[in-house]
Amino acid sequence: MKIVIIGGVAAGAKAAAKIKRLLPDSDVSIYTDDTHVSYSACGLPYYIEGNFADYTSLLVRTVEEFNASGIEVYLESKVEKILPVQQQVLVCNKKNAFLVNYDKLIIATGARPIIPNIAGVKDYKNVYTLRKIEDGIVIRERMRNSKRAVIVGSGFIGIELLEAFVKNGLFVDIIEKNDRLMPSFDSDMSELIEQRLNNYNDGTFQIHTSEIVTDILGENGFATGVKTLSGKYIPTDMVILSVGIKPNSEIARDAGIVIGETGAIRVNKHMETSIKNIYACGDCCEEKHLISGKYVWVPLGSTANKEGECAALNAAGIDTEFEGVLGSSVTRCLNTTMSMTGLTESQALEAGYSPVFAVVSKTDKVAYMPNVGEITLKVMADKFTGLLLGGQAVGSIGADKRINALATALLGHLTVQEFKRNDLTYSPPYSPTIDPLLTAMSILCKRVSKPC
Amino acid sequence: MKIVIIGGVAAGAKAAAKIKRLLPDSDVSIYTDDTHVSYSACGLPYYIEGNFADYTSLLVRTVEEFNASGIEVYLESKVEKILPVQQQVLVCNKKNAFLVNYDKLIIATGARPIIPNIAGVKDYKNVYTLRKIEDGIVIRERMRNSKRAVIVGSGFIGIELLEAFVKNGLFVDIIEKNDRLMPSFDSDMSELIEQRLNNYNDGTFQIHTSEIVTDILGENGFATGVKTLSGKYIPTDMVILSVGIKPNSEIARDAGIVIGETGAIRVNKHMETSIKNIYACGDCCEEKHLISGKYVWVPLGSTANKEGECAALNAAGIDTEFEGVLGSSVTRCLNTTMSMTGLTESQALEAGYSPVFAVVSKTDKVAYMPNVGEITLKVMADKFTGLLLGGQAVGSIGADKRINALATALLGHLTVQEFKRNDLTYSPPYSPTIDPLLTAMSILCKRVSKPC
């Protein structure tokens, strides 16, 4: 059996390792246009920040380790075409083009940064996106020789690089076209994120919302500033483009594989695409949302790993299902943890629910303890059934703890009436006597039709 | 309507405040033999440790605040007898004895330390138990003038005081009659607690397990050492007795109220005792375990608060149910978080389940991040149904996060097969790519009869 895997960052690498363990006699090979395989892309902002010295810490498995386990890895070898009838792929490297046969094909092509429509965006060496290891290396190097940075876009990557740059002594302008930071959060919560970050701002960064970068200006091949639609000119030593990513699904689309409305590859629970013997996993494919039942695109490293494993098991003939995602995520910026799970307010409305909310701010431990932080927690349920739909938390470390408990409740399709009975751990260093999550549920209980 | 509440630490204080808010015209009074009301007893070890300067930080509501809201508080006024037929209680203070009428009586008498059978245990001024505010004050004072302490018993209080004393420069001998510390945990997990604490031992304490203190010796009214059954003599400047607590249920028993097999007061979901118009809540009463359905006695501050509120609502005529507990708890000692929820191994067997386990040790965040800690997590399910039964975690901060997610799963009666699909938050500072909880569930899945 010959298994070909396209892409090898998280899902592809996981799939390769798993399938070789399941079928030691199979012929497993990874083709990737990347210069590295099997690495923690999520760790790149922390590498840039300087949390660890060497980028090789990000490598989960080296090429040598893959080879030693009998997996062939072809770096800088781009699969240009999938030929489903022939069960072949066309690979191009710097020197050659060649066809490779497969019995099973696993597409794990990931996603790539969106390049915004800005004049001069491709003209300068110090305009970056952050996706691959070499991006991290050059951004870190440039940062160490810079005094100012402009970050365009304030999603996860933008906000993580804000922290990295500020901690390295740069002055940062972060520019967001929406009216608030982290627009994947509900508006009230992302306004809170902005407030909190500004509380930790000792004059080292400026947040610009409702602002569009129109031009990148520079000289001698280096950007020196950006212009905005409102007429601002912001000087800089480097520009980060972090306005979002899109799935690398074109190669699948060209092969006639069904693409979902999200733009990512449609797969069933077995990670099978619409074409026989072709699987997809990781950031290039869609997921079912476990609450709404709708297809969504939530490209995250943890999900990629699970999907890679599921694709490998099914390709190896072991019937396994990946049910979907809750949209759980977490990140941090400047002493602020931001975490969410389930549906957002607009997603809930779109899915036909009648969402009601409770928002509470409480200390993360009993107030008399040292290093007390604050957590603001928003929980959401359907007004008529009480079914929990989602929640978001912003605040000190411990915000993530509440969201993981809520994610588990969503998984179990619990109602707010049921959750209110929860027996969460308590001790002064870990939570107030009544955990913020239980306080929020008590309030939410009063807003649903069915009493509790 | 005249409501009398006996006891006012957590459950009693909460009940008083709640009922007065619900029924502003009612006559609410608290009688307690304590010198304080409405305080965080759980915070006493942290007060002793020096996390905050003033014990008044522990007060949730002062007597003045109670009075201002129309609640009368009688300190050092012990209720000696309940007369259910007459609907009266007999109160004794330093000067008088008098009868008080009630329409509704709420018993919140709490629990008290067990005094072990040790020769000399009552002969010395510097032998302490820790339960009330004045205990905390005298222990803190004595600690500050001591170089050595002996702690008898290694449950929550014992282990919390170990940290407090060590951080204040004392040498501590902690003596446990069982073969392991924290015997409420499963044996493998409490062995791990001992290993971890010893890893943080820089010569400032000694753990003695399987050791019984037979004698406290001293002179001039002060203990100077203890003798053990194995023949050790351990010199000390103070002795803490922390071998456990028992419910203050005698006054209820004397009144003919049904007492459970646990020794605590039996109540129904409305916190009603077996006698009309008499409620009980807090550490003096039993709870139903939400997994086993059996009566248990799990005296904790968070539960006391919930029960106090439930008793108040029902006494005020608002039908409310307290369903029970999962036995969730957490504490810390010397960089070690210890947390558990659900049934222990022996409780699961006793309840008729066929428990199977998975134990995993993983980093608490991605290994390349700074300040990486380790968490060992044990999860348990029924072999035949896969129903999750409980779990325990020992390790760095973040152990509690996993247990809260597991508690939520227990609340929802999820199986390991269901939990395996959970979408927990991931980002390098918060967890490894696959959370320890999911890794543990994957392993556990293979040990249950029903495949996943």
Image (tube, coloured by chain):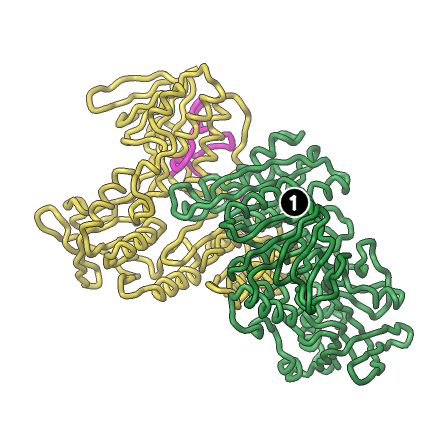
Chain colours: A yellow, B green
Reading the image, the residue beneath label 1 is: B180
Residue A447 makes an appearance in the image = no
Q: Quadrant of residue B98?
A: bottom right
Residue range (magenta)? A264-292
Answer left or right for A226 relative to A443: left
Residue at (60, 66) in percent of width and height: B44
Q: Position of residue A203 (x, y in %)?
A: 27, 65
In percent of width and height, residue B328 lies at 64, 52
Which SS class for mark 1?
loop
- Say if the magenta span includes residue B309: no
| Mark 1: amino acid | Arg
For label 1, the crowd category at 10 Å Cα-Cα, with few meaning under 14, some 14 to 19 and many 20 or more, is many
> Residue A278 lies in magenta, yes or no?
yes
Q: Nearer the viewer, residue A268 or B268?
A: B268
Q: Identify the residue at image location x=37%, y=43%.
A: A42
Is residue A223 shown left or right of residue B385? left
Q: Is residue A130 above or below residue A82?
A: below
Quarter of the image where the N terminus of chain A is located:
top left
x and y percentages locating residue A62 in the rendered image: 35, 28
**Taking the image as drawn, is residue B399 in sight?**
yes
**Height in image: B72 above or below A372?**
below
| Front residue of this view, candidates A300 and B371 | B371
Q: Chain of mark 1?
A: B
Among all residues in the image, which is located at the extreme right? B85
Viewer-side residue, B90 vs B169: B169
Tell me the quarter of the image containing the C terminus of chain A.
bottom right
